[in-house]
Amino acid sequence: MTTVTTLIGVLAGVAALVGAVVAVSHRNAVVGALFLVINLLAIAVFFVLLEAPFIAAIQVIVYAGAIMVLFLFIIMLLDLRHEDPLRGGWLQRVLAGAAGALFLILVARGTMGGAVPEPAVVAPGFGSPERLAAALFSTYLVPFEVISVLLLVAMVGAVVLARRQKDS
C-alpha cells in the first residue's frame, strides 16, 4: 500500500469512529442519524480501498441513501423534537463507563503486542456483482430476508406508535 492509500484509510477510520461515537451518544436523534451517514460513507471508502467499487456504491445507495431516508422518516414521524433527557441513573453511567474502559483496554492490549499484522490479501473478484449475488442468494439468503422483515416490522411499529401519540 502506498502512503496516500494508508493516509486515506486512517482518515476514513477516524471519520468512521467519530461518526459511530456521535451517532450513539448524541441526544438529538436527527444529529445521530446524520453522523451515522458519515460512518456509512467512511465504510464505503474502505470498500473502495479494497478495490470493491460495486460494494462501495451499494453501501452509499442502500445504507447511506435508502435506509437513512427510512430512519429519518421514522424519526420525523415519531416527532422526537421534544426529547426527554437521558433517564439513566448514576449506576448506569458508572457501568457504561466501566464497559467503555474495559473495551479500550482490550483494544489497546490487542494492538500493543508488538507484531505488525500482515496486510490483508483480497481474493480475486472480491466485490464483483457476480460474487456478491452468489453469496447473497445462497449463503446469506435467510439472514437477508430476516433483516428485511425486521426493518418492515420496525417501520410498521413506528407508524403505530406515531398514530397512538397523535390520537391521545
Image (cartoon, rainbow, N blue to C red):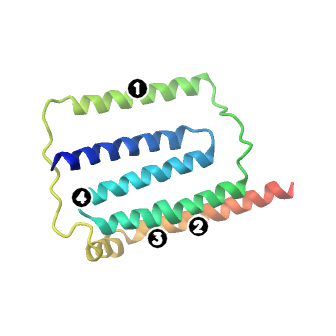
Q: Amino acid at mark 3?
A: Glu
- Mark-to-mark CA distance, 2 and 3: 11 Å
Cβ–Cβ under 8 Å for marks 2 and 4? no
Q: Earlier in the sequence, mark 1 or mark 3?
A: 1
Q: Amino acid at mark 4?
A: Leu
Q: Amino acid at mark 1?
A: Ala
In the image, which is nearer the foreground, mark 4 or mark 3? 4
Cβ–Cβ under 8 Å for marks 2 and 1? no
In the image, which is nearer the foreground, mark 1 or mark 3? 1
- Callout 2 secondary element: helix
- Is disc 1 surrounded by few (<14), some (14 to 19) or many (20+) residues within 10 Å? few
Residue 100 position, x and y percent, is 43, 30
For image coordinates 57% across by 28% down, the residue present is 92
- Residue nearest the viewer, comparing 140 with 53: 53
Q: Which residue is mark 2?
A: 152
For image coordinates 14% across by 30% down, the residue present is 114
- Residue nearest the viewer, comparing 1 with 145: 1
Residue 36 position, x and y percent, is 49, 50
Q: Which residue is mark 4?
A: 50
Q: Which residue is mark 1?
A: 101
Q: Earlier in the sequence, mark 4 or mark 3?
A: 4
Residue 158 position, x and y percent, is 68, 59
Image quadrant of residue 13? top left
- Mark-to-mark CA distance, 1 and 3: 36 Å
- Callout 3 secondary element: helix
- Residue nearest the viewer, comparing 126 with 158: 126
- Mark-to-mark CA distance, 4 and 3: 27 Å
In the image, which is nearer the foreground, mark 2 or mark 4? 4
In the picture, measured across the screen, residue 73 lies left or right of residue 44, that is right
For image coordinates 28% across by 47% down, the residue present is 9
- Callout 4 secondary element: loop
